Image (spheres, rainbow, N blue to C red):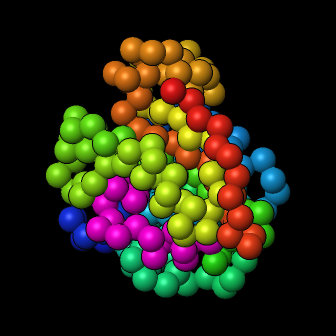
C-alpha cells in the first residue's frame, strides 16, 4: 500500500506478507477483490502504486508521486483529514496496512463510513500487537489487540462481522491458495507464528447497532 502521511503520524507503505507495492501476487489481488462481492465501486485507501485498483476501483493516497499514471481513478489526499469524495458513493473500502501508521485512526474510519453507502463493507488489515509484527517497520506507531480493533471499528460506526489472523503462509501464493489462508492460520501454533496481522471485515453500522462477531483463533 502507499503512503498516506508522514512516517510516525500517518498511513504508509507496509507489506503484510502478501507482497510489496509493484510486486503483489495476482492471487492476493483476487483474494481481496473477492471480499467485496456486492456490485459498486471500492475505495482503496493508501493505494500507492495501485496493486488493488482492479477495474472500477478508486484509489487515494497522500504521495502523488507513487500513484499510477495509466488512467486508473486516483486522488491525492491526507488520510488524516477529509476525503475528497461525496457521501455514500462507494460500495466498500479497503484499508490494508494503513491504520498502524496513524496516531489516531478514528477520523479516517469515520470518513470511510461517510463515503460508503448504507450497508457498505470495510476490510481492514493491520498488525497484531506483537513486537515482531509492529516494529518490523519503523513507520508503525501501533499494533492492535483483537479487542482494541473490535472497539475501534464499533466506535467509528462499523459493525465487525469477521476478525481473524492473516499473514504470509509459505507457498500459498505459488499454489494459488490465498483464499484458504484464514483457515490455515486458525490452526494453533501456525496462526500464532505466521498470522502476524489481523484482517477484519465490517459493515457500516446504521443506528450504531452492535452485532456479535465471529472470530477465528
| 47 in relation to 24, above or below | below
Mark yes or no: residue 72 visible: no
Q: Main secondary structure of the magenta part?
A: helix
Residue drawn at 62 percent across, 51 percent down: 160
Residue drawn at 56 percent across, 41 percent down: 163
| 61 in relation to 153, above or below | below
Residue drawn at 63 percent across, 78 percent down: 114
| Percent x, y of residue 51 | 50, 50
Question: What is the count of numbered marks?
Answer: 0
Based on the picture, tell me whether residue 109 belongs to the magenta stretch: yes
- The span picked out in magenta is 97-113
Q: Quadrant of residue 156?
A: bottom right
Based on the picture, tell me whether residue 32 belongs to the magenta stretch: no
Would residue 175 be found to the left or right of residue 134 on screen?
A: right
Mark yes or no: residue 118 visible: yes
| 179 in relation to 198, above or below | above
For the residue pair 23 and 16, the one nearer the viewer reads as 16
For the residue pair 204 and 214, the one nearer the viewer reads as 214
| Percent x, y of residue 115 | 65, 76
Would residue 15 be found to the left or right of residue 90 on screen?
A: left
For the residue pair 33 and 197, the one nearer the viewer reads as 197
Residue drawn at 44 percent across, 63 percent down: 46
Outermost residue, right side: 39
Would residue 7 be found to the left or right of residue 61 on screen?
A: left
| Percent x, y of residue 85 | 61, 82
Quarter of the N terminus within the rendering = bottom left
| 41 in relation to 79, above or below | above
| Percent x, y of residue 42 | 67, 61
Would residue 46 be found to the left or right of residue 7 on screen?
A: right
Amino acid at each position: 500500500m502507499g503512503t498516506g502521511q508522514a512516517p510516525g503520524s500517518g498511513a504508509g507503505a507496509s507489506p503484510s506478507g502478501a507482497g510489496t507495492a509493484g510486486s503483489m501476487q495476482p492471487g492476493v489481488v483476487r483474494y481481496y477483490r473477492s471480499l467485496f462481492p456486492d456490485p459498486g465501486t471500492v475505495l482503496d485507501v493508501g493505494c500507492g502504486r495501485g496493486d488493488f485498483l482492479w477495474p472500477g476501483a478508486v484509489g487515494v493516497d497522500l504521495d502523488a508521486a507513487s500513484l499510477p499514471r495509466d488512467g486508473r481513478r486516483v486522488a491525492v489526499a491526507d488520510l488524516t483529514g477529509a476525503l475528497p469524495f461525496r457521501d455514500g458513493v462507494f460500495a466498500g473500502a479497503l484499508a490494508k496496512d494503513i491504520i498502524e501508521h496513524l496516531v489516531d485512526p478514528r477520523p479516517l474510519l469515520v470518513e470511510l463510513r461517510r463515503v460508503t453507502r448504507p450497508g457498505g463493507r470495510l476490510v481492514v488489515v493491520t498488525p497484531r500487537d506483537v513486537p515482531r509484527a509492529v516494529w518490523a517497520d519503523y513507520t508503525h506507531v501501533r499494533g492492535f489487540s483483537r479487542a482494541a480493533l473490535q472497539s475501534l471499528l464499533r466506535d467509528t460506526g462499523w459493525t465487525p462481522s469477521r476478525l481473524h489472523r492473516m499473514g504470509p503462509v509459505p507457498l500459498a501464493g505459488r499454489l494459488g491458495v490465498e483464499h484458504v489462508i484464514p483457515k490455515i492460520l486458525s490452526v494453533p501454533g501456525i496462526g500464532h507464528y505466521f498470522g502476524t496481522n489481523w484482517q477484519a471485515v465490517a459493515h457500516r453500522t446504521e443506528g450504531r447497532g452492535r452485532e456479535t462477531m465471529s472470530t477465528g483463533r
